Image (cartoon, helix red, strand yellow):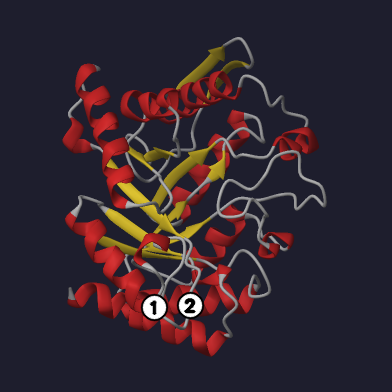
Amino acid sequence: MRIGLALPTFGPGANTDGIFAVSRSAEDLGYDSLWTGDRILSPRNPGAPYPVGDGVMPRVYENSLDPLVSLTLATAHTERVRLGTSTLNGLWQPPLMLARSLTTLDLLSGGRLDVGLGLGWMPDEYTAVGVPWQGRGRRLDETLDVLRGYWANDVFSHQGPLFTIPETVVGLKPHQRPAPPVLLAAFTQAGLRRVARRADGWLPVAMPLPYLTGMWATVLEEAEEAGRDPSTLRMVLRVNPELTEEKADPERLPEAGTLEQYIDYARAAAEAGVHELFIDFGQSPLGPDERADMTGRFVEGVRAG
């Protein structure tokens, strides 16, 4: 199993020094990848509860860096690790603009980009950017059509229900051919079907492993029914730890636990078939030195298993 690390793009550590330090330590410690998330609002009265825990959105999201700009900075300070988004909300900008940004990042990174897209959970953010909350699935499907067409063709045009792109020459090409891998976050039946039929992999968040493997089995079955080779799909699991000093009740995992418990969870995830797992220490109230220590102990502990 590949092991990744989230860049500090949320909270008090979200700054140039934090991104530089985490990027360099990730390569030095043997991590395989760096990841960013996407958040543009921290409403005082959100229109929907946070989908994890007690429903209250963590305060770290009050300070959120742009995910693609942050990955660009990480690109300049790394040579080996892959760079991914888990997840980038693919609907908050026109798909042609998204295609240009993603292609540029893949080119500048030498082909290290994993494009992870999601729909988000908060209607307020859609309101803020002028995009309808309703019809998100259809908008994502057309966005995927534009991305695939842009990457595949030297001359490209698109005529869809939402977007019209006049015929244009496309000279900008990603380093990875025919395209960077596209992974999707999804938890509904329709979303898992879209992963199976249209994506290169799935981006879940940490959950009890029986639930995770059950949903993954659905993806693989849908892929086979669609005539795709299920073995070509990969699963990249995000872990947002709530670190405790005392060992937590096993039933609370992966919601909360000690570092050792999260190491055990990661080992079990590897045995369950997870292809890649990344952890976000930036969402825990740790100082820079303590976070660096946790980062080293985590990858060492998982690798030792």
Which residue in the structure is indicated by mark 1?
Answer: 247
Residue 6 in view in this figure = yes
What residue lies at 66% left-to-right and 51% top-to-bottom?
39
Which residue occupies the foreground of this view, 77 or 213?
213
Residue 227 in view in this figure = no
Query: Position of 280 compared to 199: left or right?
Result: right
Instruction: Please tell me the numbered disc located at residue 65.
Output: none
Across and down, in percent, residue 268 comes to: 23, 61
Above/below status of 77 relative to 153: below
Above/below status of 3 relative to 16: above
- Disc 2 marks which amino acid? Thr
10 Å neighbourhood of mark 1: few (<14), some, or many (≥20)?
few
Dividing the picture into quadrants, the one containing residue 80 is: bottom left
Helix, strand or loop at mark 2: loop
Across and down, in percent, residue 115 comes to: 44, 44
Dividing the picture into quadrants, the one containing residue 197 is: top left
Q: Quadrant of the C terminus?
A: bottom left
Which residue in the structure is indicated by mark 2?
Answer: 244
Disc 1 and disc 2 in contact, CB within 8 angstroms: yes
Q: Quadrant of the N terminus?
A: bottom left
10 Å neighbourhood of mark 2: few (<14), some, or many (≥20)?
few
Above/below status of 123 relative to 68: above
Helix, strand or loop at mark 1: loop
Across and down, in percent, residue 183 comes to: 39, 40
